């Protein structure tokens, strides 16, 4: 039976979407980049491999499925992901809470202040 899960690009990506940059137990979510429509394990993987700049998802497109849970392979909308309290609403797997420090790279929102990094 063919694998129908989205392909996740990146550096040394494992079966749960962890990569060479972020490989802790909760680093299990990938993002579909607005600029190219491809899933990447993280922003650094995109920078190294895509050959173009990241474009942020505008707020009016946050109902788009663009987050992949690396535990259950469910695609979440950006709104679902941002409201998830750092866990998958489908399988309850925990996501890295520090990912919120990087939201401004992916989503149209202000960067966190330097104290929260």
Image (tube, rainbow, N blue to C red):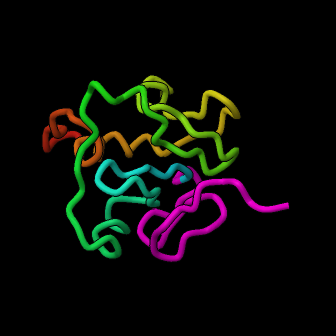
In reply to whether residue 23 is colored magenta, the answer given is yes
- On the image, which quarter does residue 40 sit in? bottom left
Q: Is residue 62 left or right of residue 11?
A: left
Q: Is residue 44 left or right of residue 5?
A: left
Residue 116: x, y in percent? 23, 40
Residue 58: x, y in percent? 24, 33
Residue 59: x, y in percent? 26, 27
Q: Is the residue 2 above or below the residue 68 in the image?
A: below
Q: Is the residue 52 above or below the residue 65 in the image?
A: below
Q: Which stretch is magenta?
A: 1-27
Q: Is residue 75 left or right of residue 80?
A: right
Residue at (43%, 50%) from the top-left corner? 32
Residue at (48%, 31%) from the top-left corner? 77
Q: Is residue 88 left or right of residue 32?
A: right
Residue at (45%, 23%) from the top-left corner? 83
Along the viewing direction, whichever of 115 and 24 lies nearer the viewer: 24
- On the image, which quarter does residue 57 sit in? top left
Residue at (50%, 27%) from the top-left corner? 84
Along the viewing direction, whichever of 33 and 81 lies nearer the viewer: 33
Q: Which part of the image, by quadrant, shows the N terminus? A: bottom right
Number of numbered tags placed on the structure image: 0
Q: Is the residue 17 above or below the residue 83 in the image?
A: below
In reply to whether residue 92 is colored magenta, the answer given is no
Residue 87: x, y in percent? 56, 34
Along the viewing direction, whichever of 5 and 113 lies nearer the viewer: 5
Main secondary structure along the magenta-highlighted residues: loop
């Amino acid at each position: 039976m063919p694998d129908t899960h989205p392909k996740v690009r990146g550096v040394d990506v494992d079966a749960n979407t962890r990569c060479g940059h972020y490989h802790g137990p909760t680093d299990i979510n990938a993002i579909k980049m607005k600029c190219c429509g491809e899933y990447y394990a993280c922003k650094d993987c995109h920078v190294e491999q895509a050959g173009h700049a990241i474009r942020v998802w505008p707020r009016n497109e946050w109902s788009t499925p663009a987050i992949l849970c690396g535990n259950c392979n469910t695609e979440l909308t950006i709104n679902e992901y941002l409201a998830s309290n750092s866990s998958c609403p489908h399988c309850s797997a925990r996501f890295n809470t520090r990912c919120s420090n990087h939201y401004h790279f992916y989503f149209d929102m202000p960067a966190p202040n330097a104290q929260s990094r």
